[in-house]
Structure formats: structure tokens, C-alpha cells
Amino acid sequence: MILTHSEFKFIDRHFKDVLLLIPGWATDYRIFSSLDLNYNYLLPVNFSCTNFAKDLSGELDKRGIEKIFILGWSLGGFLAYDFALENAERLEGLILLSICKGFSRAILENARSGIKRNKRAFLYKFYLDGFSKSDREGVNWFRNYLLNDYLQGMESQQLLAGLDYLYRARIIPESLARIKEVRVYHGEDDLIVPLKEACQVSPFLEKGAFICLSGLGHALFLNHRFKEKFLYGQRNLNQ
């Protein structure tokens, strides 16, 4: 079954600000379970790219949240960017992880073929490609808590719907200068989005707003070093 709308849950962590966490392709909100940042969390528990901005606006209205910080990872980064452009008045800050201007058609066609040919084998390689060879912390957490659930539970229709969104998803680097407080984090050893592709957005960011983490890959936030860099970048922006 293809989800046509997103549903959210709010986690009160006793902080002042609210952070929406948007997961990447072939994952769900549980990928952020180990992420400990100084925010209350808003999580899409039923996740659909269709009408995401409209669904989010409705959720914010329902909860009386006027402004929000948004963290989008990979596919979630495109959704975060789309919402930020259309709803600038509701945005406190935008945090993009492991993003690029857009995925090539060849990469997306390869993923589509892999899902149709042998979904489990394709996903297994895709998930492990999300980690650098040196990131034992991140890959061990993922193996212990999510890998088997994802391999068994990800439905082909939903995966293909996510690829359909990525065919048209684009970030226009020049437009990032119009968005409030943008920070981009990227792993130096990212196999899924090579660093050189992510660097195409860096000239349009404020100084210090593009943060590269050495020795980490696509799922960089599953390593404790991400939080250290995040807090350091947050202090710099607040100065």
C-alpha cells in the first residue's frame, strides 16, 4: 500500500524549540532513535512524499506551533528544502544532511531495477553503503536495531514511490541564500552522495555553514561525532 499522506508524533523532551526530523529513502523515523539534540522532536510516523508540505503545515496548525527547525536527511533534505522555500515564515532554521542538487536518472533507474529484481539484496548493500569503513559505531547500531526490520518490512510500492519523488526533487543552490539559518552536514566518505556533489551547494551558504565530517559516510548522524559538530556549529551561528 502506498501512503498518500504523512502523520506525525510529538515528543516533548523539555526543550524550548521544536525540531522536525525527516528520514531518507528506505528508512523511517526510527533511524533517528539514537539522535540526542537539544530540541523537542516532531517525527513523521507514517511518511509520504505526497503533499508533505501541506500535511506538515496542518500538523503545525493543529499543535499551535508557529515556527520550527527542520532537519532533513538525504531524501528528507529535499522535502525540508521544499517546505522551507514555500513556508519561510514558519521556519526557524534548516539543517540538511547528506544532500546534493539532485540524483541522476541513472542512479534512480538502477535502484528501481534493484528493488524489482531482488529487493532484499539491493537494500542490504544500500544500507551498508551508508557507512564508511571506519564508522563501526554507526554501522553496529544500525545492524543491532534496524537492519533486519528494514529488510523485512520495507514495501516495494513505498520504495518505488520514494524514487518517483526523487526523479523530480531538486535543490537550487542559489536559493539557499534566501532561507534562514541553513546548515549542511556531509560525510567525507559518503558513497551514496560523494562529497564533490555536496560541495556544489557550499558557495551559496554563509561562512561555516557547510560542515564536512571526516571518516563518516551517508548516515553520519548515527556516530557521536555528529552531535559534537552539530553543537559546535549551533554555537557559531548563535554568536
Image: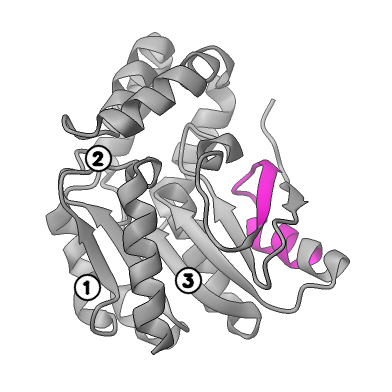
- Residue furthest toward the left? 196
Task: Identify which residue, 38 or 176, lies in the foreground.
Answer: 38
Mark 1 closeness class: few <14, some 14–19, many ≥20 residues within 10 Å: some
Left or right relative to 40: residue 94: left
Give me the C-alpha separation between circle 3 and circle 2. 22 Å
Disc 3 or 1, which lies upstream in sequence?
3
The residue identified by callout 3 is 94
Instruction: Name the spot of residue 26 as percent of width and height, x first.
Output: 48, 32
Which residue is the site of mark 1?
202
Residue 55 falls inside the magenta stretch:
yes
Q: Quadrant of the C terminus?
A: bottom left
Q: What is the three-letter code of the residue carrying label 2?
A: Ile
Q: Position of residue 8 (x, y in %)?
A: 74, 49
Relative image position of residue 232 (x, y in whole percent):
34, 70
Q: Which quarter of the image is occupied by the N terminus?
A: top right
SS for dot 2: loop
Q: Is residue 11 left or right of residue 150?
A: right
Magenta region, residue range: 41-58
Q: Is residue 48 visible?
A: yes
- Identify residue for label 2: 192
Tag 3–tag 2 contact (CB < 8 Å): no
